[in-house]
Amino acid sequence: MVCESWKATLDTYLDGELPSEEMRAFDAHVHNCPSCSADALTHLQLKRNIQAIGKRFTPSAEFRKRMQQRIAGKARRNSFGFAWVAATAAIAVLVAVSLTTAYNERGRVRTEQVYSEVADLHVATLASSSPVDVISTDRHTVKPWFQGKIPFAFDLPELKDSEFSLLGGRMTYLDQAPGAHLIYDVRKHHISVFVFQERSLRLPGRLDENSFAPKDLSFNVETWSQGGLRYFVIGDASAADIDGLARLFKDAS
Amino acid sequence: MYLTHFETQSDSFEELAMPLFDQLYNFANWLTRNREEAEDLVQETYAKALKGFPSFRLGTNFRAWMYRILRNTFLTSRTGLKAQMTLSLDSEEEEPPELPVEGNTPETLLMERSNLELLRRAIDELPVYFREILLLCDLEEMSYQEIAETLSIPIGTVMSRLSRARKTLRNSLQITVSQGMNHGL
């Protein structure tokens, strides 16, 4: 009977996660109890075997080299990734100079991180071999696909009389918060629309409808909050197109 | 001037991130079960981490941060979404019943026959939520706190999920033992 309580914490003991006093008591018990000692040995054996077979996959030398080059400064300087980092840095410098008196440093950095992350999500998705998980031009197919995958609902606009067409959608994360990522097309330009729950994001106060957006951003972007949801519309289409799609969303909600 | 700043930042990113390359690649393979997808996953993880590095707070757990990015990237991938369908975590507290052990235990089977392939298959067949937590604990030797940070769940949930993962694994191996005995192995 007494051993039952020991056995219940056996794995926690073997993981070394019991408080030190309990660890010492368990040590003493295992040394004097053949049954718990045998159990500890078998559980430990399983742990060791998992460790042995766990180290199973090794990256190829070619893949390792490729990754190192990407991370190394020289390769990155020529890549979009580096261009983006540099652009963000340039924005940081410009914004710091012009807005130091109006905004505090923390808010500024955070704002740029948000824009940077959203732009990153947009670019990474378009570069992916499968940018959308639900492929449909029908909003009545795309919207229900998100049910059960994200903890909120949102409306998609009717596009019949517009130049925009819906390509599909996928789940995404910003600040570890799940959200919807929709991709639209207008005259061969792809535009991403991101929808998140406002309260799930740690957003700086200045990210409101008429907020500042980094001037040197490679994309046009618009963001606003409506009905507890935070929307981002971003792409390399014209500012008028970005605004046009944003308006359709605002009217639909 | 900003180039110097970012070069410095990328240097420190490289110093922190590249030592984790092998283990992240290994973990990505366990999650995706596909070499090409694992490479894509690692690549995307590093790209995201590099971009997000300015927001990483030095002094906090970098390894957990990298694993969290990798895992979230996996969960939003096509394979990850499919994998999530295989298990509902609604009954987080429900423990699977312990199967009766007759004769050999799963561990003695593995010791006696040195048949680690059985264990590998059993881990491969675990739902992704069990597979990842088991590997983070037993392979990566992460503390419960580190696992909690990586999976963004409370420590209590780490303990209960780990316990369920181990019981499910042991039950699966136990079934293999029984089947092996029936087939005269």
Image (tube, rainbow, N blue to C red):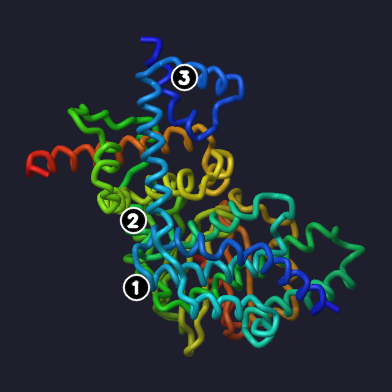
- Residue at mark 3: A31
Depicted A36 relative to depicted A64: above or below: above
On the rendered structure, is A139 left or right of B147?
left
| Residue B111 picture location, percent across and down | 29, 41
Mark 1, residues whose alpha carbon is within 10 Å: few (<14), some, or many (≥20)?
some
- Residue at mark 2: B83
Residue lying farthest right? Answer: A101
Q: For numbered disc 3, what is the local secondary structure? A: helix
Establish whether labels 3 and 1 are both on one chain.
Answer: yes
Q: What amino acid is found at the position of numbered circle 2 in the picture? A: Ala
| Residue A57 picture location, percent across and down | 41, 64
Residue lying farthest left? Answer: B183
Depicted A246 relative to depicted A49: above or below: below
| Residue A126 picture location, percent across and down | 49, 78
Q: Which mark is nearer the camera, 3 or 1?
A: 3
Residue B19 visible to the viewer: yes
Cα–Cα gap, marks 2 and 3: 42 Å
Q: Residue at the location (45% across, 71% down)?
A: B39
The chain under label 1 reads A
Q: Which mark is residue A135?
A: 1
On the rendered structure, is A204 left or right of B133?
right
